[in-house]
Image: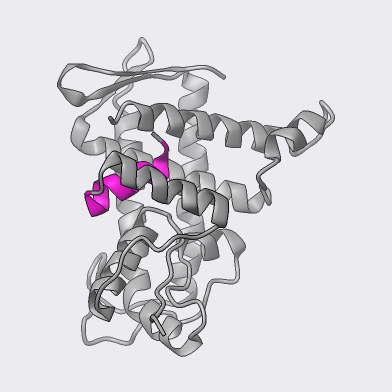
């Protein structure tokens, strides 16, 4: 997969995607949002309005998520102090997840603006949300694939019909996309 | 510029040189001290890093 990413006058970034690439991104983020949903449903937080936790309500989850990808996106804040990590999580995890959802929403809304030529323009103010959302998706996928430093060699050694190949290819492409986007920010 | 450097520059306002040095420290040593301050300030920074997807933890100097 190849695409084009270019900084435009005024700081916006032009991205060219094929319909297939846009669809892959949409679906992958859809899966990530479902992962967040599964976590939120497991430990509901009382809300006074959609997305607004009740400040006086019961606290959220205090345990590191069992799913490794979620655990990577919602990590412990204290390495050697389980009690402090649990308390910190109880009061911050909901907002952390809401922030990640908000970034993804910005990116998905942007994808809906793709023109017939496959081009979309990400306003300068939205580039950070795109970068963070892409990074979260990469992290989640990388954790699933147990990506290590030498992943390029691992991919090169996979058989052409290895069922893991598409996921690795997506990981490589996301890496390229994020890298190209961050290079526009100097 | 890497994503990690971008985060250090954007959030902490560090110079490109300093942000790049910290990024390389993280890359080679697996970790780096990127911020110091009160517990309250550091919890805020850790939250922000988690928001960016960087695996930050808070530790008290002994």
Q: Position of residue A59 (x, y in %)?
A: 34, 84
Magenta segment's dominant SS is helix
Most foreground residue, A100 or A148: A148
- In the image, residue B5 sits, relative to residue A7, either above or below, namely below
Q: Is residue A30 visible?
A: no
Q: Position of residue A8 (x, y in %)?
A: 23, 17
Q: Quadrant of residue A85?
A: bottom left
Q: Position of residue A46 (x, y in %)?
A: 30, 79
- In the image, residue A113 sits, relative to residue A147, either above or below, namely above
- In the image, residue A145 sits, relative to residue A64, either above or below, namely above
Q: Is residue A3 visible?
A: yes
Residue at the limit of the structure toward the left, as seen here: A10
- In the image, residue A171 sits, relative to residue A137, either above or below, namely above
Q: Quadrant of residue B17?
A: top left
Residue drawn at (25%, 43%), measured in percent from left and top? B15
Q: Is residue A125 left or right of residue A118?
A: left
Residue drawn at (33%, 66%), measured in percent from left and top? B47
Query: Where, quadrant-wise, is the N terminus of chain A in this rendering?
Result: top right
Q: Is residue A2 left or right of residue B23?
A: right
Membership of A117 in magenta stretch: no
Q: What colour scheme does the image use?
A: one colour
Residue drawn at (25%, 65%), measured in percent from left and top? A50
Q: Position of residue B9 (x, y in %)?
A: 28, 45
Q: Which residues are magenta?
A: B2-13
Most foreground residue, A176 or A165: A176
Most foreground residue, A169 or A37: A169
Most foreground residue, A26 or A128: A128
Q: Is residue B8 left or right of residue A39?
A: left
Query: Where, quadrant-wise, is the C terminus of chain A in this rendering?
Result: top left
Residue drawn at (37%, 28%), measured in percent from left and top? A183
């Amino acid at each position: 997969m190849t695409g084009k990413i270019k900084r435009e006058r005024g700081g916006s970034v032009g991205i060219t995607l094929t319909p297939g690439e846009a669809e892959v991104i949409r679906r992958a983020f859809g899966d990530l949002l479902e992962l967040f949903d599964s976590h939120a449903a497991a430990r509901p937080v009382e809300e006074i309005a959609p997305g607004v936790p009740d400040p006086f309500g019961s606290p959220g989850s205090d345990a590191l998520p069992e799913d490794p990808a979620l655990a990577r996106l919602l990590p412990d804040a204290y390495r050697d102090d389980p009690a402090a990590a649990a308390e910190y999580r109880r009061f911050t995890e909901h907002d952390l997840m809401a922030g990640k959802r908000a970034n993804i929403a910005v990116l998905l809304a942007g994808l809906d603006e793709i023109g017939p030529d496959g081009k979309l323009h990400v306003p300068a103010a939205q580039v950070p949300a795109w970068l963070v959302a892409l990074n979260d998706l990469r992290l989640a996928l990388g954790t699933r694939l147990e990506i290590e430093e030498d992943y390029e060699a691992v991919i090169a050694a996979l058989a052409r019909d290895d069922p893991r190949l598409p996921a690795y290819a997506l990981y490589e492409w996301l890496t390229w996309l994020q890298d190209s986007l961050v290079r526009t920010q100097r | 510029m890497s994503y990690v450097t971008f985060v250090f520059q954007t959030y902490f306002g560090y110079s490109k040189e300093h942000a790049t040095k910290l990024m390389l420290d993280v890359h080679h040593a697996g970790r780096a001290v990127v911020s110091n301050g009160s517990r309250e300030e550091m919890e805020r920074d850790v939250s922000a890093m988690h928001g960016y997807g960087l695996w930050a933890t808070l530790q008290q100097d002994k």
